[in-house]
Image (cartoon, rainbow, N blue to C red):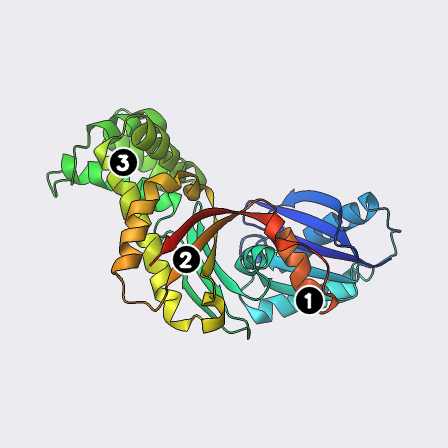
Amino acid sequence: MPYFGGIEGGGSHSKLAIVNEQGKVVAWIDGPDTNAWQIGVEEVCKRINSMVVEGKKLAGMEPEEKLKTLGLCLSGGEQKAQNQKMVDYFAKEFTDMSEKVTIQTDTFGSISTACSNGGVVLIAGTGSNCQLVNPDGTTHRCGGWGHMLGDEASAFWIAKRAVKYVFDEEDNMEKAPFDVTFVKNEMYKYFKINNQYDLLDHLYTNFKKSFFAGFCKVIAVEGGIVHKDKLCLHLFEEAGIALAKHIIAVAPFIHKSLQDGGLQIVCVGSVFKSWSLLKNGFIKTIRASDTHLKSLTLVELKESSAIGSVLIGAKTFQLPIDLTKNYKVLEKIDV
């Protein structure tokens, strides 16, 4: 019996799925980060092989038995030359891994987990990104350039923007749109600081992007939901506007066939847990734009995008996987 593998490869963790020809998952394996920009091509390949070896064992496969296909949708997998280096390394060093390896960036896996013929993925986690994949394979991207250049509407962006409002108000440089007292107090508690200067350690000497971005959850839960602080609500409205701008940016490149019945947008990332705080800014911005979009269906994945990676690798085999079971509808919007 042939087996098909797929890996959702992230900058902090990865996940492998192995599926049989009936489309049933026979193995799930959790693994470490697999971003080649962070740890190098050789280390990524070793980590992927280790996950496959463990997965094959769990699936009841023999050690020398190869996967029929292996789809890899990896964070940092945008460069074809680098991806080819990985394929070549697999062929040379890990001959029992898979008959065929296909590599794409992580956004492709998310789309393929919910959409059978292309679509749009909108990511708002620690960072942010938007990727369009048309049925003919043409693509367009907006964002995804990291926290130094953008990451608009990401958790890091929201957290940094909140801090900036406080600093500008304290410096008397620019008045915030709403009172900063709540955000300031929560900022001091979260970062365990006594003054503005103490925060510099978290921004420079001991900067950890994921920890800094974690302040976004405080703004959302304590500020937006529990206390309904006006500045916190404003920050998420701004984030909703920024997310809508990503969709507006890719809209001119979306094929008409993807819009039949409403454009499906796969929403990925922790920021979407606060959709109730984002939606007003998102919807009003979309409706005020001059795109040709008539309606949108925003969906959230219920399953790992490793499933989409499996399908990308096994594209010619038409595995019987019901994509509708992989997602739930977040919002339907008439534009």
The answer to whether the residues at label 2 and label 1 have Cβ atoms under 8 Å apart is: no
Q: Determine if residue 86 is in view.
A: no
Pointer 3 residue: 232
Q: Nearer the viewer, mark 2 or mark 1?
A: 2
Determine the residue positioned at 77% across, 66% down. 92
In screen coordinates, is 15 left or right of 208? Answer: right
Helix, strand or loop at mark 2:
strand
In screen coordinates, is 27 left or right of 158? Answer: right
User: Label 1 is placed on what type of residue?
Assistant: Lys
Residue 161: x %, y % from top left: 27, 43
Residue 207: x %, y % from top left: 40, 40
Pointer 2 residue: 296
User: Label 2 is placed on what type of residue?
Assistant: Leu
Label 2, residues with CA under 10 Å away: few <14, some 14-19, many ≥20? some
The answer to whether the residues at label 3 and label 1 have Cβ atoms under 8 Å apart is: no
Helix, strand or loop at mark 1:
helix
Q: State the quadrant of the N terminus.
A: bottom right
Q: Residue 315 — which label?
A: 1
Q: Nearer the viewer, mark 2 or mark 3?
A: 2
Q: Earlier in the sequence, mark 2 or mark 1?
A: 2
Label 3, residues with CA under 10 Å away: few <14, some 14-19, many ≥20? many
Residue 54: x %, y % from top left: 78, 45
Residue 41: x %, y % from top left: 62, 59
Determine the residue positioned at 53% across, 58% down. 107
